[in-house]
Amino acid sequence: MKYIFVTGGVVSSLGKGLAAASIGTLLEHRGLKVLMQKFDPYLNVDPGTMSPFQHGEVYVLNDGAETDLDLGHYERFTSGELTRLNNLTSGQVFDSVIKKERRGEYLGSTVQFIPHVTDEIKIRLREVTNKNPDVKVLITEIGGTVGDMEGLLFIEALRQFALEVGKENVCFIHVTLLPLIKAAGEVKTKPTQQSVAKLRELGIQPDIIICRTEADLDEANRSKIAMFCNVEVKNVVAFRDVAHTIYECPLDLRRDKIDRLVVDKIGLGDTPAPVLEDWERFVQRIIHPKHKVTIAVAGKYGLQDAYKSIYESLIHAGALHNSKVKILRVETEDIEKRGAAEVLDGVDGILVPGGFGERGIEGKINAVRYAREQGIPFFGICLGMQVAVIEFARNACKLPGANSTEFEKETLYPIISLQEEQLGVEDMGGTMRLGASDSYLIADTLAHRLYDGANMIRERHRHRYEFNADFRERVEESGMVISSLSAKEGLVEIIEIPDHPFFLGAQFHPEFHSKPNHPHPLFAGFIAAALEYSRT
Ligand code: GLN
């Protein structure tokens, strides 16, 4: 296996994850089997307990791992199957070292950062290597910024690892920022020089430097960076701000032939130049759409990345229908204050995403009611499905005050509740239904049609609460259709209302299965309905 390590310098939020994912796309289009992973220096064992409003979305894998949102980019940009092994945090590293120490596995030696902690990081690299014998290139992104104290052990582990597997099998890529000082009209290279100097101090000489720039990178600056960062001029690559969509990133990086530089470094230079027609067509459909729909995403807002995969899925589905998807971020507390009719006026579709906690819940319920009564296409995901059921129970089944026990323990009508066996479990984490599982679709339903007549589907979950089976009949009598049940437990997976242009809620997260040229069928159906609605 060959290894690419991607580090970041100067500032965070540089698009390091997108740069790494784009290199993945280009190498895959060279016919190489690629796998991507992320090392995160924070102490959380996984991002599952972190607030999406601070850290961005928690991205769930098929095996149920709760991972960093960059893994979402990896899955959308490349086709390698990711597992919990592909996201390593300092929390996991230390947890493992301490457990080994307690079990006496270090045979009495003094347990130290070096070699024990760095060894643990290398063990993971070897584990991923051994588990994926058919993978040719493993791309590892190191979270954080070089120079941060918390990243030091990862950098040291990579330095050692490169020596062990042979430097000819490893390519170090450093992504930095070239700030533009507007008043002077100058692009500055000094932060890049200093960041590379820091990396070299830690024993790593980058092979390629990717410079994130607002403007273009001129020859003078390229030469300057090359000279003072000790790389060849051709190995200084520009990564410009893309004009329309993140899916332009691989095309932009290809301009400076990054894929060629990488394969030359790791001895895979005999692979053919990438043909990216499919990707280019997809990008063109995003840049030049024929139609336009406005979709309200009615959620809670803090950091913009909280609903990342949902936005991307909407874009993928829009591209399929040649449509721009304008996303209106609706704060549901705003609906509580100003009313759904005012806040949601003029939208072509309403999406209520997943979430936890009570804040904004009534606003979400009002958004559902508005969509249901006005015949506006509605798509509920996870919590969004649960609030759709609550709204229906309250207003269509006449069960006043129906609620989820997540928000009201003693509600008279606990239409959404914990499964019996989960009651009494207090420990957060480990109590959720996580990862991909099978469910079957019921014939003659919207869901069955959207999934092209499939009988079984396999989707990813991340939730604790469920549709309460005691209320099934009551809800069905009032016109809600249950169109999918989980294969194992018979839990409700999809609900819909037939007498409506498009009203569907899914207990799982379809947004984790959408790819640029393969939008998820539920998103594709939702956007088609929104387009239809926009024409009325
Ligand atoms: N809070 C809800 C639950 O735990 C929904 C979770 C979600 O939307 N991901 O079931």
Image (cartoon, helix red, strand yellow):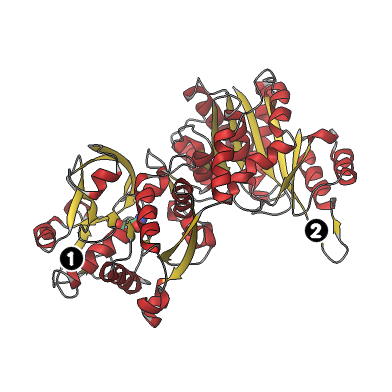
Q: Earlier in the sequence, mark 1 or mark 2?
A: 2
Are dots 1 and 2 in contact, CB under 8 Å? no
- Which residue is pictured at 33% across the width and 47% down the height? 461
Report crowding for label 2: few under 14, some 14 to 19, many 20 or more residues within 10 A (C-alpha): some
Q: Is residue 452 left or right of residue 354?
A: left
The residue to which callout 2 is attached is 180
- Which residue is pictured at 51% across the width and 53% down the height? 290
Q: Amino acid at mark 1?
A: Pro
Q: Which mark is residue 414?
A: 1
Give how far across and how far down residue 141 sits, in percent.
61, 40
Q: Which mark is residue 376?
A: none
Give how far across and how far down residue 64 sits, in percent.
37, 42
Q: Quadrant of residue 280?
A: top right
Placement of the C terminus among the 4 image quadrants: bottom left
Q: Is residue 140 left or right of residue 131?
A: right
Taking 441 as reference, is 164 above or below it?
Answer: above
